[in-house]
Structures are given as C-alpha cells and as structure tokens.
Amino acid sequence: MNSKKRDFLISISIVFTITIVLVLYFNFMFISLFGLNQENFIFIILPLVLLGLVIFLSFTNNILKPLFKSDEVLQQSIKETIHELNIPVSTIQMNTQMLQKKIDDEKSLKRLGRIKQASDDLLKLYENMEYDIKKQIDKIDKQEANLKEIINHSISKFDDIKKDIKINSNIPDINISTDINGFEKVIDNLLSNAIKYNLKEQGQVNISFENSILSIFNTGENINTKNLFIIFDKYYQENSKNDGFGLGLNIVKEFCDKNKIIINIDTLENGNCFNLNLKKILITN
C-alpha cells in the first residue's frame, strides 16, 4: 500500500470515528431531554443523520484537501512534462527531414532513416501517453471523423506484418462522432488480433459495414464457445503461445462500453467475426 492510499484511509477512519462519537453524544443528549418514542423518533433521528452528514463532509473537506491538492499539482506537472516532450521530438523530425534532402550518401541516409523511425516511434509513444493521461484526468472531447479513412489508416499500419494475409475493406463514406483516438485504438487492436489469429496460408480479413454494424472477420480457428464470455477479460489469451499480454480486447470492450457501442462475436464456419454496432456514434444527415 502506497503512502497516499494509507494516509487517505487513516484520514477517512479518523473523520468517521469523530462523526460517530459526536452523533452518539448528541443522540444521548436528545434522548435524555425528550425521551424516545414513536411520536418523536423521526424528529430526533433525522436531525442527527443530517448533523452527522454535515460533520463528516466538513471534516473530510478540511483533512483531505492537502491530499487532493498534491494530486492536482502532480496532474498539472505531468501535463506540462508531456507537452514539453513533444518539442524535442518535433525538432528531431524536422531536422531529419531537412538533412535527408541534402545528403546523398547511402549509409548516412540509412542512419537518418533509423533516426526518423525512432523519432516516429517516440512521437507515437508520446501521443499514447498524452491520450492515456487525458483519459484519466480530463474529459475526452468527441470529434467528427470519416470511418473509411480511419479503417484505411489502420490497415496501412499492418502492411509490414500481415505477410500473405489479404485484407479486404468495403466501407462507405460515412462520418462518426466519438473519441477518435480511442476508436482508432479499438480498430488497431481488432485488426491486430484478426491478423495474429489468422490462417498461416491464404488468410483473409474482411471489413464491412451494413445497417450500422461494422464487422471485422478473419479466417482461422473458431473461438471456443466457452471462452466467449471471458475473452474480453484483462490478461486473457486463448492461446498463451501468442505474443502480447492479453490487454487488446479488454481495451476494446472498455471503450465500447463507455461509448455505448455494442460489441459481439460470431463464430462462423471458417472463422470469427467481431461486430460493432456504431448506431450511437454515427452522424446521420
């Protein structure tokens, strides 16, 4: 148990104990003065409950204010640090691009390419950290985006790892309004799983949209029916031999529940299909 959690529990326990003692004292005083029967029961108990609530909130606010203040300072410091990280990364990228235009030496260009790739990875890490922090301490604003563009952008990320797996996409030109960064993570995770658990040869991933349902189908071994209820649990992996930590589908389910997107899985004859009902986030004309 960390010190902040320990201090919080101790503070709450002290406030609760003081409140109980004071309420019992006033209860004793009232009963001594007026007695206790059916006629005056509500007139004694109700003021005592309200008094206990006022005392508890008053003491809690005063005692816990320093703890909450330190959290606010920490949150602000994290925000500022994350923001400042973007500056050196952007500087590296800008100068790398300028050097690539002026250098012709093949070895130097390869080295610059590695620097650019590393800075791109660092920028992606920065964006993920910024999003995760905002999700925890701020409200994420909804944005409008094109579903087809999101899907195509996600597909392009897997060009180097999909190997012989063919990805087919048939998405209409429609817009959605949601936490775009989070929605992109959902699509990335579903595509990653569709590729990871696909057939070794002549595998396919089919992405389609019909009647507000976004479907991502992959050929491969069917998900065991008994696992359909636990597949979204954190750290769960149907095949422990696969890479990863079993967090992808949990992230997907958490986002869908928060954004009123109904998700279900169909186990078909030649594969599995994840269906997302986007009715709540679709922008209709």
Image: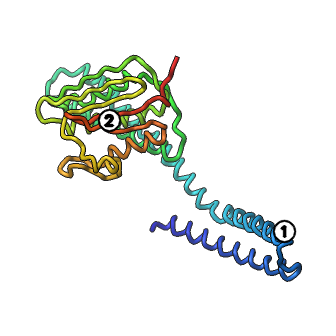
Side (left or right) of 129 relative to 157: right
Judging depth in this view, the residue of 225 and 126 nearest the camera is 225
Q: Dot 2: few (<14), some (14–19), or many (≥20) neighbours within 10 Å?
A: some
Rendered residue at 40%/17% (across/down): 173
Q: What element does badge 1 sit on?
A: helix
Measured from the top left, where is residue 273 in percent x and y? 29, 34
Question: Which picture quadrant has residue 101?
Answer: top left
Q: Dot 1: few (<14), some (14–19), or many (≥20) neighbours within 10 Å?
A: few
Side (left or right) of 280 relative to 269: right
In the rendered image, the quadrant that contains the N terminus is bottom left
Judging depth in this view, the residue of 84 and 126 nearest the camera is 126
Rendered residue at 35%/33% (across/down): 275
Measured from the top left, where is residue 111 in percent x and y? 19, 32
Rendered residue at 55%/55% (across/down): 71
Side (left or right) of 195 relative to 53: left
Question: Which picture quadrant has residue 194?
Answer: top left
Q: Is residue 75 above or below residue 62?
A: above
**Residue hosting label 2:** 274
Label 1 and label 2: CA atoms lie apart by 59 Å
Q: What element does badge 2 sit on?
A: strand
User: Which amino acid does the dot numbered 2 rest on?
Assistant: Phe
Side (left or right) of 113 relative to 141: left
